[in-house]
Amino acid sequence: MEGKALFFSHGKITLVEVRVPEIGEDEVLIKTKACGICRSDINYYLGKLGGPEGVKGHEGTGTVIELGENVEQFKLGDKVTTLGGPFAEFYSTNQRNVAKIPGDTEEFEYWISEPLACVVNGVRGSGIQIGDNVCVIGCGYMGLLLIQAIPKNALNNLTAIDINNSRLALAEKFGAESTINSREKDPIKEANAVIQGEYDVVIESAGAVGTIDLATRLTRRGGNLVIFSYHIREEEVPVNSWHAKGISILNTSPSFSKNFNRDFYDAVKLLKKGVFDQKPLITHRVSYDSAERVFKDAVEKPEAYIKGVVTF
């Protein structure tokens, strides 16, 4: 049995036929309904990331169509979200990477949960304490999810910095008390004026050249600088300032997590509770047979793009 999949090479996406995977005793086979486009997928398409050509993607949702002999917590027809899941009609994964979503849902794209697990890990690893002043730099998809997840009622202030006013408006909608457009105003001067000082925790979620330096300058002596985003290019970082200010540098990638599956399960629980709202964030949806169009929009029209999803 074969199914359709998206084969990535630099600058090109091709629709190909691939064999449907056989499942092991602890695995489930899933018919894909939606798969989120990660920034890493876009960067591979642009040639900014190396690695072999192949089927990409890791933000799958779908319906269970086959069960391994040891799988007891799921049944055929269950609607699920998973850790992993490529841009392909069918994929298999271990049952520990699967969580049920409401059976009446028809909008699978809003239940993509792998990025949310990254956010749960990022907030857990940030060291945020009651009464802190917190700043999030970068209000793309992941930054806005961070702002949704941060326990704002326990903070003194939550400030968001970005170069896009529409994204800053979303940050404010999601609970940021202060927003700063760093293209229009001096972010250091404006941010310091908000709280009359520097921040206890600064989360760098932009991934752009220079934002780690900005985060360093905004972090107080002895504060936490959280490098949440992935930086494509190597760059110099202000280690002398880190040392002089006694800043704790926290690299909250998925590998930082003590238990990423727990982060995933908790992310799904928060999604069910309404803590996460992806509807305003998913700006582009396209069927798998026209997927390359979304990737081009992400590159050519970045002001209007936040998150893209491929549907099957």
Image: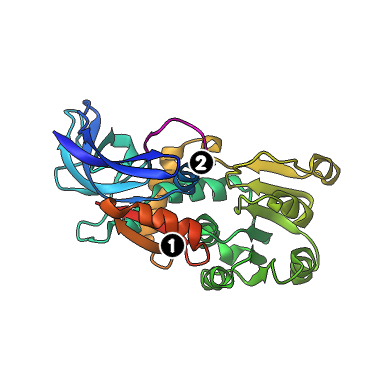
Residue 99 lies in magenta, yes or no?
no
Mark 1 / mark 2, whichever is N-terminal: 2
The picture places residue 181, in percent across and down from the top left corner, at 66, 69
Q: Amino acid at mark 1?
A: Val
Which residue position is annotated with label 2?
Answer: 47
Identify the secondary structure beneath mark 1.
loop
Q: Is residue 110 visible?
A: yes
Highlighted range, magenta = 49-55
Mark on residue 95? Answer: none
Q: Residue farthest to the right? A: 244
Q: Which of the two residues, 29 or 289, is positioned nearer the viewer here?
A: 289
Residue 73 in sight from this viewpoint: no
Q: Position of residue 99 (x, y in %)?
A: 30, 45
Residue, disc 1: 275
* Residue farthest toward the top in the current orientation of the protein: 24
Q: How is the image coloured?
A: rainbow
Mark 1: few/some/many CA within 10 Å (<14, 14-19, 20+): some
